[in-house]
């Protein structure tokens, strides 16, 4: 039998290590928040930051202060990012979730081949397909349009959604569906009324993942857009990279501005999200 | 039966058709482009050149360095992520209060876009005032120019990438750990098994599937690394951090040697597929609870 004191000291070690891990996880972001209020980051000594805090970097990147109507770049990029991320995620969900359900529940001839193919799409690095995407989007006349970007982002998130939701549906017991089938309910009705509500944690989780991926994408924005459809990550290059090097204060402000909405989303939905991930990791019941 | 077929078509066809249209062409294009001679946007006069592009790419004196950079990056980040992720997962599961909050906080780096990871770490690595060197200086340790020195640049990228992706491993493994059946743990305790024995003989085997999944996924993401390199080192100094995906970007998109870029793409694809295809297979072969209906 271990003594109580030994257990306590173990607990303290655990808490200290976890606290250290949290510190490392958050340190770059906290640094960014603090230093975004510093004038001339390079010359400052870290501990004196409170005394001469300034919002000059924030003024340069926030939409409110960019008052000339035709050029409010941050607002423009933010709206573009928002529209592209929302639209591509919603389209990929509408297409992918029903398909994942079938792959998880009803095997049909060729379903394994199809599934292997869809999963293998996940492995393709975007850099390989970027040039053909450029040619397709150009042929369709959708270069530098939101439609073009939405189409491409949907292509990227759809295989991920199918794969994750398939894993998720497999974890849901079939008894409910069998019971309602005996009651004579149609399959579409069963899917919408019974399966989807049970899978809501999974749907929220894949929504967040797809949204984060679209929101973060730099490569496609770099190749497929110019100014009209430019998104936030691409906009960073023009706010941050100055002729003489990086404007660090603006960089910090811009990065915090870009990270904040996604963080807020994760914190608001974290209960759903964590439960969803529990199921993806192969847990058999949602507690 | 008829209804079943209609449902399958209705549910699956839209996705499949969409993916067929948009993703088959790029792959065929890339495959085709790697066997013809294509420089700049001049698609006329494309003659079949056999394996010449591949030979040119492989015999390039940079090629072995780039491949070894890529493999070094992938193996190091995957190993680090696995060890740190598993360690954190075990720690997190020993916490009783505020566990959800802790997991959510640990998850934060995952939501940071790669471009932000790149810029934030670039500032942390700044030789004079970056946090990393400030801390090292306080501890009396040497303060290298992390991203500017060929001997430390790769290590710096590996640490930044690991920071961004460890949360994924931690989250999946801690979720899987919570799923370890209580009955098995109790039985082991009754038999007098020590904590260590429980971990090695019950928890770790239970985690096998989750570990497999995280390793495959983290390695795919490591193979794909691009944004991070683009905003930190641009493959430098020299070619010390040039990895495959960045080389494809340079050759195919910046210099517009489209065929050479495509040949490099095929090589990268083979590297990834060779590594991951057995995972895809095993996922499909798994038992399906729903097969009864």
Image: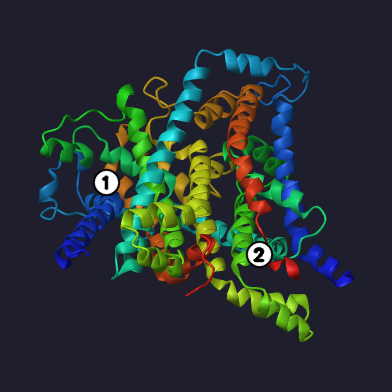
Check disc 1 and report its element: helix, strand or loop: helix
What subunit carries mark 2? A
Residue B275 can be seen, yes or no: yes
Check disc 2 and report its element: helix, strand or loop: helix
> Image quadrant for the C terminus of chain B?
bottom right
Viewer-closest of A67 and A279: A279
Viewer-closest of B227 and A115: A115
Image quadrant where residue A94 sits? bottom right
**Label annotation for residue A97:** 2
Where residue A43 appears, as percent x and y from the top left, is: 16, 39
Contact between labelled residues 2 and 1, with CB atoms less than 8 Å apart = no
Where residue A36 appears, as percent x and y from the top left, is: 25, 51
Between circles 1 and 2, the one closer to the viewer is: 2
Q: Which residue is drawn at 64% across and 44% down?
A: A143
Can you say whether B154 is above or below A83 in the image? above
Q: Residue at x 64, y 58 (%)?
A: A162
**How much space separates mark 1 and mark 2, taking CA atoms?**
42 Å
Horizontal side, residue A17 vs residue B217: left or right: left
- Give the crowd class for mark 2: few <14, some 14-19, many >=20 residues within 10 Å: many
Viewer-closest of B32 and B257: B32
Image quadrant where residue B42 sits? top right
Q: Do labels 1 and 2 share a chain?
A: yes
Horizontal side, residue B286 vs residue B127: left or right: right
- Residue ID for mark 1: A249
**Label annotation for residue A231:** none
């Amino acid at each position: 039998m271990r003594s109580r004191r030994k257990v306590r000291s173990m607990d303290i070690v655990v808490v200290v290590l976890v606290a250290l891990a949290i510190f490392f996880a958050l340190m770059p972001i906290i640094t960014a928040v603090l230093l975004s209020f510093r004038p001339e980051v390079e010359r400052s000594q870290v501990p004196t930051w409170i005394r001469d805090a300034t919002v000059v970097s924030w003024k340069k990147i926030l939409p409110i202060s960019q008052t000339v109507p035709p050029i409010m770049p941050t607002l423009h990029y933010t709206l573009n990012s928002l529209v592209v991320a929302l639209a591509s995620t919603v389209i990929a969900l509408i297409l992918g979730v029903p398909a994942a359900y079938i792959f998880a529940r009803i095997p049909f001839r060729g379903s394994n081949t199809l599934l292997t193919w869809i999963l293998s799409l996940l492995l393709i690095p975007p850099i390989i397909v970027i040039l053909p995407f450029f040619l397709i989007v150009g042929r369709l006349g959708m270069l530098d349009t939101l439609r073009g970007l939405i189409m491409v982002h949907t292509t990227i998130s759809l295989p991920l959604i199918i794969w994750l939701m398939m894993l998720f549906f497999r974890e849901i017991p079939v008894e409910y569906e069998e019971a309602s089938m005996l009651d004579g309910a149609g399959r579409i009705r069963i899917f919408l009324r019974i399966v989807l509500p049970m899978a809501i944690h999974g749907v929220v989780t894949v929504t967040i993942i797809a949204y984060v991926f679209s929101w973060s994408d730099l490569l496609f924005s770099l190749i497929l857009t110019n100014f009209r459809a430019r998104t936030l990550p691409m906009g960073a290059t023009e706010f941050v990279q100055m002729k003489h090097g990086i404007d660090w204060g603006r960089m910090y402000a811009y990065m915090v501005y870009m990270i904040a909405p996604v963080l807020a989303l994760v914190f608001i939905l974290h209960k759903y999200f964590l439960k969803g991930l529990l199921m993806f990791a192969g847990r058999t019941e949602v507690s | 039966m008829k209804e079943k077929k209609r449902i399958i078509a209705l549910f699956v066809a839209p996705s499949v058709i969409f993916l067929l249209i948009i993703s088959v062409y790029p792959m065929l294009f890339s495959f085709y482009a790697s066997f013809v001679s294509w420089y700049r946007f001049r698609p006329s006069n494309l003659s079949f050149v056999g394996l010449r592009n591949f030979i040119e790419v492989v015999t390039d004196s940079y090629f072995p360095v780039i491949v070894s950079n890529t493999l070094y990056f992938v193996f190091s980040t995957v190993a680090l992520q696995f060890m740190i992720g598993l360690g954190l997962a075990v720690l997190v599961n020993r916490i009783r209060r505020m566990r959800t909050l802790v997991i959510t906080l640990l998850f934060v780096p995952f939501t940071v876009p790669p471009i932000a990871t790149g810029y934030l770490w670039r500032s942390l690595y700044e030789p004079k005032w970056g946090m990393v060197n400030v801390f090292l200086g306080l501890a009396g340790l040497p303060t290298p120019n992390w991203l500017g020195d060929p001997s430390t640049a790769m290590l710096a990228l590996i640490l930044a990438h690991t920071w961004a992706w460890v949360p994924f491993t931690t989250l999946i493994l801690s979720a899987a750990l919570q799923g370890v059946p209580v009955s098995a743990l109790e039985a082991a305790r009754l038999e007098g098994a020590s904590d260590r024995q429980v971990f090695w003989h019950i928890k770790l085997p239970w985690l096998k599937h989750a570990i497999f999944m995280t390793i495959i996924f983290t390695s795919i993401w490591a193979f794909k690394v691009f944004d991070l390199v683009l905003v930190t080192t641009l493959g430098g100094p020299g070619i010390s951090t040039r990895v495959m995906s960045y080389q494809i970007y340079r050759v195919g998109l910046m210099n517009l040697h489209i065929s050479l870029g495509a040949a490099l793409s095929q090589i990268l694809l083979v590297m990834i597929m060779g590594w991951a295809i057995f995972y895809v297979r095993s996922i499909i072969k798994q038992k399906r609870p729903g097969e009864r209906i």
